[in-house]
């Protein structure tokens, strides 16, 4: 039997649905993603040089918060410490840290925009002297036995608890702690290595309402599960098919940390599709920005955020407070549904714009009114017509037919709001 753990307050999170992930640290200097330290097997003394040249003279957290707000994001999760171990706040427990308290400035700036705050804390630490060298460590190919001789994970676990306590007591109310990650295969690390039970108990004591992800390696302890870089086709479910609380985390391109040379950026249409797909499958979306080494969201990131914001400005009713549609309404071709159970509104997203009619199975007689969200203009519902006509379709029973204008509304993914009877 799985152990039963206490949980935080998911109510706001379920409503808000959309957050910003921020991966920012000294790895923005080499600009090849946040794993560069170990992928490149860069030796510690070389990697540490990046701290010296991490000079974010354009850092403006208020601008970040504004960009997130405009995109419609309601919470932020910032990397206080990533796997490289470099701390983005003024921790009393290490010297390997920024000379400025970025955590403080960031949480304050986002709160000022009414955005909730969360912190990412890496369980891995490639800098800490007590962290046992394992399969992911930058020093993995050196004499491991020798390197690990005096390392002591117990001391490292104490360090983690001390730091997490700092983060949860010095920065006002933190809404989410996002730990990353457990790899319990040979030569990896599991919950026992992190003393996860102890860490978790400490957090729940300090902040009973806080939300914690599921990556500490204690099944059932997370307030949500965290699929990464893909959209689960039927949402995330337990073995009996029940929907789990879940949040997909996604990048604009491939890496989480700033990657200068990547050219695999998703288009605005893909991003909106992704957002709608998360919500329509019962999940949240945590969408990542990797600011550059000067502390800016680069043009590509800003363009993406602005495109999402432009869409959200008119269509966010189909996101906030929404979830998957009732199972009795199969999703029509080329579409996605989201559903607001409180208002009984079903939102139909047209991912590809059809010709003249949209056919909605099982909705005949069940809709009070249909309109576009972007301008609230009516979308007429049409009855099936004469048997022999060539210009109107013969419909199976139960199909509701909407007649849409020839020209698609001027919004990236048009949304039709269906108020159910
Ligand atoms: C991964 C990576 C990491 C990233 C995280 C975000 O597990 O290790 O770099 O921070 O996913 O979900």
Image (tube, rainbow, N blue to C red):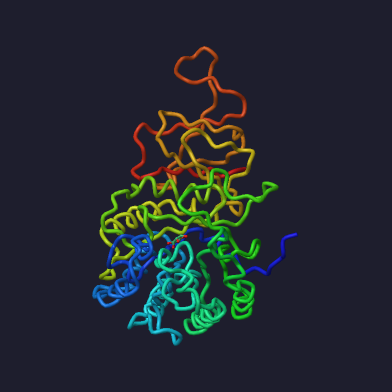
Residue 3 in the image, given as x and y percentages of width and height:
72, 64
Q: Nearer the viewer, residue 381 or 186?
A: 186
Placement of the C terminus among the 4 image quadrants = top right
Identify the residue at horizontal 42%, vertical 58% (top origin). 287
Whether residue 118 is visible: no
User: In the image, is 382 to the left or to the right of 341?
Assistant: left
Decide which of 386, 135 is in the foreground and name it: 135
**Outermost bottom residue:** 92
Viewed as shown, does residue 286 lie left or right of 328? left
Picture layout, residue 87 above or below residue 270:
below
Above or below — where is 192 with respect to 154?
above
- Residue drawn where x is 50% and y is 21% of the image: 393
Q: Position of residue 271 (x, y in %)?
A: 39, 49
Determine the image quadrant of residue 211.
bottom right
Q: What residue occupies the far right of the structure in this picture?
A: 1
What's the residue at 33%, 70% (across, down)?
43
């Amino acid at each position: 039997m799985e152990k039963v753990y206490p949980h935080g307050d998911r109510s706001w999170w379920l409503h808000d649905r959309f957050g910003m992930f921020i991966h920012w640290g000294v790895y923005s200097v080499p600009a090849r993603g946040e794993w560069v330290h170990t992928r490149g097997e860069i030796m510690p003394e070389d990697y540490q040089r990046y701290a010296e040249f991490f000079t974010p003279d354009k850092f403006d957290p208020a601008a970040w918060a504004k960009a997130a707000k405009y995109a419609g994001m309601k919470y932020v999760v910032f990397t206080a410490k990533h796997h490289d171990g470099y701390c983005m706040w003024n921790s009393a427990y290490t010297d390997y840290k920024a000379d400025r308290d970025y955590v403080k400035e960031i949480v304050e700036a986002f709160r000022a925009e009414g955005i909730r705050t969360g912190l990412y804390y890496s369980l891995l630490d490639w800098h800490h002297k007590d962290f046992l060298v394992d399969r992911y460590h930058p020093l993995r190919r050196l004499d491991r036995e020798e390197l690990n001789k005096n390392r002591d994970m117990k001391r490292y676990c104490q360090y983690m608890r001390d730091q997490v306590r700092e983060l949860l007591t010095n920065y006002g109310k933190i809404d989410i702690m996002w730990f990353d990650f457990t790899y319990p295969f040979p030569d990896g690390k599991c919950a026992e290595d992190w003393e996860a039970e102890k860490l978790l108990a400490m957090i729940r004591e300090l902040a009973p309402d806080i939300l914690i992800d599921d990556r500490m390696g204690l099944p059932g302890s997370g307030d949500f599960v965290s699929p990464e870089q893909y959209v689960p086709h039927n949402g995330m479910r337990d073995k009996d098919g029940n929907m789990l609380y879940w949040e997909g985390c996604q990048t604009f391109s491939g890496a989480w940390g700033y990657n200068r040379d990547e050219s695999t950026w998703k288009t605005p249409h893909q991003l909106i599709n992704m957002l709608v797909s998360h919500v329509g499958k019962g999940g949240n979306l945590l969408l990542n920005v990797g600011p550059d080494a000067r502390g800016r969201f680069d043009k590509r990131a800003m363009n993406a955020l602005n495109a999402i914001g432009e869409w959200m400005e008119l269509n966010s009713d189909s996101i906030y407070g929404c979830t998957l549609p009732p199972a009795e309404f199969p999703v029509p071709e080329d579409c996605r549904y989201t559903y607001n159970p409180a208002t009984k509104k079903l939102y139909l997203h047209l991912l590809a714009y059809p010709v003249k009619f949209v056919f909605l199975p099982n909705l005949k007689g069940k809709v009070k009114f249909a309109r576009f969200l972007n301008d609230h203009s009516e979308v007429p519902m049409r009855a099936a017509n004469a048997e022999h006509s060539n210009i109107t379709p013969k419909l199976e029973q139960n199909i509701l037919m909407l007649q849409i204008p020839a020209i698609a509304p001027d919004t990236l993914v048009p949304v039709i709001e269906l108020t159910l009877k």
